[in-house]
Image (cartoon, grey):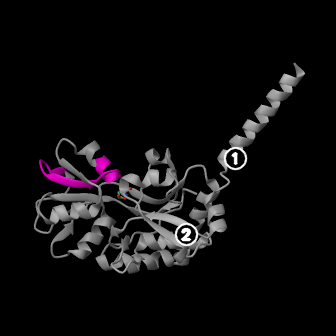
Amino acid sequence: MRGRALLLAGLMLVTAAACSQEAVPSDSLVARAVGSNKLTIGIRFDQPGLSQRTVDGRYVGFDVDVAKYVAAELGVDADHITWHDSRPSARETDITSGITDLIVATYSITDKRKQLVAFAGPYFDTGQDLLVRLRSTDITGPENLNGRKLCAVGGTTSAEQVRDKFAQAVQLVEYPRYQDCVTALLAGQVDAVTTDDVILAGYVAQNPELLRVVGKPFSAEKYGVGLRKGDGEGRAAVARAIQKMITSGEWLESLNRNIGPSGYRIPPPPQVTEQ
Ligand code: GLU
């Protein structure tokens, strides 16, 4: 009897040890960055001003700068970052599967996503808007899109919001990437594209004689850096890096350099609450 009680106590100890190990993964972001001096970061390759792969293979934009700043604070310099093209609908699985260490891709912090991944931030505040052809002066907001075709990207808060609020009125067309929506808009296949206005501003900057943003945001989006759930140390380290980027002035410098040329009004920095 005593032997069995001892065995049981021993088993409980082993289980408790396993549980506490789960709560603080031995290969946390910080440990991985220090140990390997490498990070894989998910970004977009086709969002002008935010993150873009140039024809000569460089990565530029505000999200890229945030990613590089965070990596540097974790001790990993830019040429040790592997950039991964994370589609909007793949962001959660790119984190949970371990394909990426971090996601810095206009990734809105939401309660639904927090069930699967963790966020540090926010590092930018924006809102959902509409991109239309310059001559479509009759489109002044989502309420007068009745019967028209609206393009959104699958797996985004933008598509979800349209489905929840305007589904009866508009015909939602979903593509995997924003560039596909913009091409469809320019070709006259859809009447508007919807997502965060800072993203849309980048496409207007590429085609100012053809496109415009309506300019009446109808949601509040807070961008966070996505990382694996349960890695509190990693989240705190990323949040500290974001805060430092803001206070050092590099945050504003990057925005002025990357987003400024589109004419987009740079908002004040957000409070870093996810830490
Ligand atoms: N920020 C929104 C989201 O996370 C829309 C823009 C995007 O595709 O990243 O879904």
Q: Viewed as shown, does residue 188 lie left or right of 193? A: left
Task: Inspect the magenta stretch and tell me whether residue 149 lies in it.
Answer: yes
Return the residue nearer the eye: 167 or 174: 174
Q: Position of residue 193 (x, y in %)?
A: 22, 59
Disc 2 target residue:
70
Q: Viewed as shown, does residue 9 lie left or right of 249? A: right
From the image, which quarter does the N terminus lie in? top right
Residue 52 picture quarter:
bottom left
Q: Residue at x 44, y 77 (%)?
A: 254
> How many C-alpha atoms fall within 10 Å of the one at disc 1: few (<14), some, or many (≥20)?
few
Q: Viewed as shown, does residue 44 lie left or right of 7? A: left
Disc 1 target residue:
21
Check if mark 2's residue and mark 1's residue have beta carbons within 8 Å. Answer: no
- Residue lying at the far top of the rendered structure: 1
Return the residue nearer the eye: 250 or 271: 250
Q: Is mark 1 within 8 Å of ligand 1?
A: no
Q: Is mark 2 within 8 Å of ligand 1?
A: no
Dot 2 or dot 1: first in sequence order is: 1
Q: Secondary structure at mark 2?
A: helix
Residue 42 picture quarter:
bottom left
**What residue range appears in magenta?**
143-161
Task: Inspect the magenta stretch and tell me whether residue 216 lies in it.
Answer: no
Q: Residue at x 81, y 33 (%)?
A: 10
For the residues marked 2 and 1, what is the alpha-carbon distance in whole angstroms?
A: 25 Å
